[in-house]
Amino acid sequence: MLFYYYTLLFISSILLTTFFFAKWGRNVSIYLSLIFLLIPLINLCYFKFALSTSTSEALLLNGLLYFLNFGLQFFSFLYVFTFCKIKLNRYITSFCFLLLSTGIVLMALSPWTIGILYKQVFLRNTNGIAYLRKQYTSVHTIYYCILVFFIIVDFLIMLLSLRKKQISRRNAAVMLLSYSVISIAFIIGRAIAPELDVMPCSYTILQIMLLVMIRRIALYDIDLMTSIAIQQSETIGIASFDNEHRYLGCNSLAEQFFPEFKNLYVDSRLDSSTEFFSTLNQLMDAADSHKGIAETTLNLQKKSFKISVSNLYVSRFFSKKHKPAGHQIKIEDNTREQLNIRLLNNYNETLTKEVTEKTEKLENLMEQFVLGMAEMVQNRDNNTGKHIRRTRQIVKILTDDMRIENRLGRSNNFYESLVKAAPMHDLGKIAVDDQILRKPGRFSPEEFEIMKTHAQKGAEIVRNIFEDYDDKEFVQVCENIAHYHHERFDGSGYPEGLKGTKIPLEARIMAIADVYDALVSERCYKKAIPPEEAFKIIQDGMGIHFDPMLNYYFLRCREKIEEYYKS
């Protein structure tokens, strides 16, 4: 009966290992693969041990079981670290395995086993099943201590990872249950019957439990699932080449995209006989010099393909570092994507054109509105309307010159806003009483105080009109021109008595245009003066009424301003 027990467990472990490698072998941790490889070997040793006919044969198989059991426990120990996403130094793990396994071999498989591990050993046979009666030495305790150390460390590592929320609770529970099954079987030993060893059964149960949870474990391995998704993708072609551009292979979709792959022999060097192959060679060269990554879009006839190249790596022996061993080519048919991009670009161009046209229309409407407001002022004051148009032109002449060298460091939008806003500098006069606004001759002190309020009122009107206008710089320029164009550089102006550069630049420029036009224009209370005299007055006012820094531009523009007034 026990013969069938050991036979069944051995065959079951082989079938489970075969299923594991057929289903998952290439896509899981190397430590898990080693566990599944060792369990059938261990069960085979238990099977052969049960059929031993001599003490020497039994001791040899018993020594192999010590070594294989240690290997199983060691790789299980390392797998827990992988499961918990903790990387170990390969030098250290390799050294520990060699050291410990050598010690196990010397203790369990040497001629001095009796005396090192055992005081006495007796071979017994019950119902055709052999087993050993052993009296252990104190050295044997070291083996137990190693196994207990593995279990305790694994338990602590999983507990720490659970607290850090790095692993799944369900998967951790299955892992702990697997350890518990093996530990219980190890403790019980042959307490049930001396000829019955429950360890083979516990290892087979371990295989079943691992297979049950492997699918869930794989779901948490992002790199693995990404790799599988790419391999099984029906939209991505994959091809591989080594560092010398020798062909290693490709999937069926790559051949479907580019039938040229069918003519390549494995290990043949990629030439540049076609546009596609030439592109691949260039991309692989580019990847070597750009951190292992390069991509391009290849348009062939009516098809468009996105081709990307990344390095393939192999692990260096006993090292965490990886060495580039070749290139992986990823090919995606992005014809539809490129078509959508072209359609989107065309739509964006059309939309941009429409937005630009509508923006221009809105700006023209705004400009007409500003000029319309000036016309309203003109209807109340014949001098003011024409004055608004002339001062705007002077401002344009000055700002055009300022843009050439741009010593003032202002943007084009500032200068454009200044020209557009110039007609609004006297907008506040619309709120001044007609009797004062239309009065011939000079104002009385009281009337002049009322007239001076047009600056403050103009700023308020501008602020209310353009409250929701998007171009905030334009709104600020408008408001500053209306508010401060009567300020004087020496601080004797109105309405705030600002001095020097505290007066906004736009208002300082507007002041020159405003005064110059007032000088050369005929008013009901005065005659026009010659341009030469007007220029002298402006010159004399630099540093008092006007910003002396602007004198440079005023002199440069004198000829253009005089030509404008002559026309």
Image (spheres, rainbow, N blue to C red):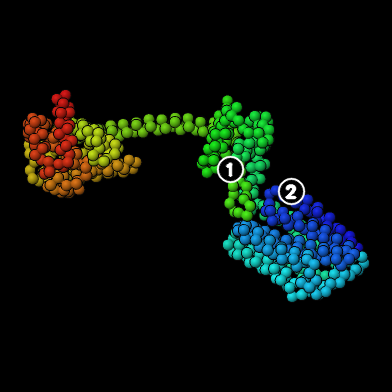
Of 174 and 433, nearer the camera is 174
Q: Nearer the viewer, mark 1 or mark 2?
A: 1
Q: Is residue 475 left or right of residue 533?
A: right
Q: Which mark is residue 23?
A: 2
The quarter of the displayed image where residue 369 is located: top left
Residue 430 visible, this orientation: no
Could you tell me how far apart the alpha carbons at marks 1 and 2 are, in whole angstroms? Answer: 27 Å
Residue positioned 55% across, 42% down in the render: 292
66 with respect to 362 (left or right): right
**Amino acid type of the residue that numbered disc 1 sits on in the rendered structure:** Asn
The residue most toward the top is: 567
Q: Residues within 10 Å of mark 2 (few under 14, many from 20)?
A: few
Q: Seen in the image, is 30 located left or right of residue 382?
A: right
Residue at mark 1:
311
Quarter of the image that includes the N terminus:
bottom right
For the point 24% across and 43% down, the residue is: 479
Residue 257 point in image, percent of width and height: 63, 31
Measured as percent of width and height from the top left, residue 285 is found at: 54, 37
Give the percent coordinates (x, y) of residue 229: 65, 44
